[in-house]
Image (tube, rainbow, N blue to C red):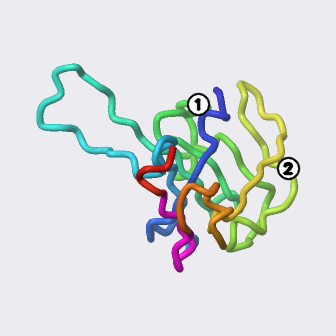
């Protein structure tokens, strides 16, 4: 499993699990949500892209990275089929999670996971290709090259 394919932006959309926010993967190209609906006509048979997510699982007291189409085993806990999991914690804010995470790579190993808020505070935070809006989001310039 190439975990680097899942690097990128994860956004809260109001969904909660076990009393904490769930973070959903966004598209790499434009940061927009994945379209998870089937078109009425799909003659090419293009697959729907399902986003990965990061959520807290009370049953194991850990923040986890998961994807509904990827499992370690057919016997995984259906509520929490983790691929990466933090150490035991009860923190609410995912940015406060400390220590190494367990990672599944055919066997369970440990790794470091970096999670940071990506709110902007100025034009430089938007790579000088747009403006930083008051809500902390970058608004890219349409004609920037």
> Judging from the image, what secondary structure is the residue with disc 2 in?
loop
In the image, residue 23 sits, relative to residue 44, either above or below, namely below
> Which residue ends up furthest to the top in the rendered image?
44
Q: At x 62% / y 48%, what residue is drawn?
A: 65
2 or 1: tag closer to the N-terminus: 1
Looking at the image, is 116 positioned above or below residue 143?
A: below
Q: Residue furthest bottom?
A: 134
Looking at the image, which residue sits at the far left?
40
Asked whether 97 falls inside the magenta stretch, the response is no
Badge 2 density bin: few <14, some 14–19, many ≥20, Cα 10 Å: some
Q: Which residue sits at x=76%, y=28%?
A: 107
Q: Which range of residues does the magenta coloring cover?
A: 132-140
Q: Residue at x 18, y 28 (%)?
A: 42
What distance separates the C-alpha of mark 2 from that of mark 1? 23 Å
Q: Which mark is residue 73?
A: 1
Label 1's element? Answer: loop
Q: Say if the magenta span includes residue 138.
A: yes
Q: Which mark is residue 100?
A: 2
């Amino acid at each position: 499993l190439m975990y680097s394919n899942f690097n990128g932006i994860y956004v809260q959309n109001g969904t909660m699990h076990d009393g904490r926010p769930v973070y959903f993967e966004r598209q790499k190209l434009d940061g927009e949500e994945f379209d998870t609906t089937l078109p009425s006509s799909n003659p090419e048979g293009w697959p729907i892209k399902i986003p990965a997510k990061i959520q807290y699982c009370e049953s194991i007291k850990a923040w986890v990275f998961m994807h509904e189409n990827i499992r370690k085993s057919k016997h995984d806990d259906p509520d929490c089929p983790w691929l990466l999991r933090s150490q035991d914690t009860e923190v609410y804010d995912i940015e406060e999670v400390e220590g190494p995470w367990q990672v599944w790579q055919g066997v369970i190993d440990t790794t470091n996971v970096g999670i940071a808020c990506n709110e902007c505070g100025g034009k430089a935070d938007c790579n000088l290709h747009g403006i930083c809006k008051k809500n902390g989001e970058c608004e890219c310039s349409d004609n920037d090259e």
